[in-house]
Amino acid sequence: MKCELCPRMCGVDRETARGFCGMGNKITAAKAMLHKWEEPCISGERGSGAVFFSGCVMKCVYCQNYDISSENRGREISEERTAEIFLELQHQGAQNIDLVNPTHFVPQIISAIKYARERGLSVPIVYNSGGYERVETLKTLDGLVDVYLPDVKYFSDDLAKTLSSAPNYFTTAMNAISEMLRQTGKPKFVGNGMLERGVLVRHLVLPWQYRDSVEIITRLGERFGGEIMFSLMSQYTPFGKVKTDPRFEKYNRRITTFEYEKALQAVLAAGLDGYFQEKSSAKEEYTPKFDLSGV
């Protein structure tokens, strides 16, 4: 069957070949863990049950998970084993199951969620992605995903193509968020402050691109307002090609206080509610070691 899961619709038969995402038709994951570095309403006190999937529908040149997203490090696992991992994380105390970069495995993950729920999985499912999603694929998750955690990375199409090989990114991401909202409705919290349902949109401020950030934030406020939560991230740390490829040398630095403050002012002006990272969050040690543990 030709793969049309992501906006690229590369048409590859992933039973016999690898798609643009770098993956075949079997779930591949690089780590499963209790992750305590998501937003407070996702990680809580005990941590989010994060499963990091290998491959990616985007090719961000600065990706902090570059060795699994572009170099495809990981272990092939069955849908049944994936379901077992969800249940193991719940048993360890996970506040939810955090599907990190799941787009290219949606059909298999749907099967794993259903299998796990039949066997006692009761915590919310979080869909944590780069925002480059087909609405048609998201619709297949209706009723299965409780919380959507998408990025909105770029407003400029040239920037999206240059840094992530993702044409028509902004329009695609905004339409995806509309579908996510249709499924979950406004944010709903439980008594301990955990996000039980809703959409929490993330944006990572990039070096030199604070004007792009301001445009994204302004338009999110205009289109979605109080319907979404918002998380402004300052954790940009040079990884991947920006450290080795001279074409991206200008991005081989962390963001400045000025750049972050401009984005922060835009969030306040847009009236978006949510989270702001401290600039001290830009540390390599916050990136997990993808040692295949837990899978």
Image (cartoon, helix red, strand yellow):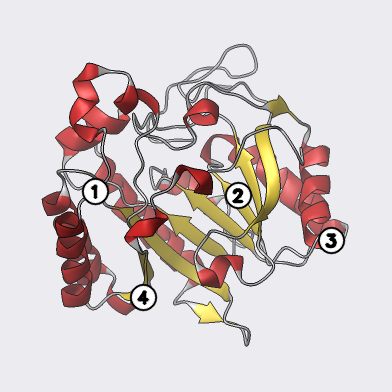
Q: Earlier in the sequence, mark 4 or mark 1?
A: 4
Residue for badge 2: 99
Between 58 and 52, which is closer to the camera in this rendering? 52
Neighbours of disc 3 within 10 Å: few (<14), some (14-19), many (20+): few
The residue positioned 21% from the left and 76% from the top of the image is 268
Q: Report if the CB atoms under discs 4 and 1 are less than 8 Å apart.
A: no
Q: Earlier in the sequence, mark 3 or mark 4?
A: 3
Marks 3 and 1 close (CB-CB < 8 Å): no
Of the numbered discs 2 and 1, the one sitting upstream in the chain is 2
Query: Would you say the residues marked 3 and 4 are in contact, meaning their CB atoms lie under 8 Å apart?
Result: no
**Mark carried by residue 255:** 1
Who's the residue at 48% across and 31% down the image?
A: 56
Is 4 drawn above or below residue 195 in the view shown?
Answer: above
Q: CA distance from mark 4 to mark 1?
A: 29 Å
Q: Earlier in the sequence, mark 4 or mark 2?
A: 2
Query: Mark 3 highlights which residue?
Result: 91
Classify mark 4: helix, strand or loop.
helix
Calculate the distance from the C-alpha at mark 2 to the C-alpha at mark 3: 17 Å
Hey, what amino acid is under mark 1?
A: Ile
Residue beneath disc 4: 227
User: 16 or 288: which is nearer to us?
Assistant: 288
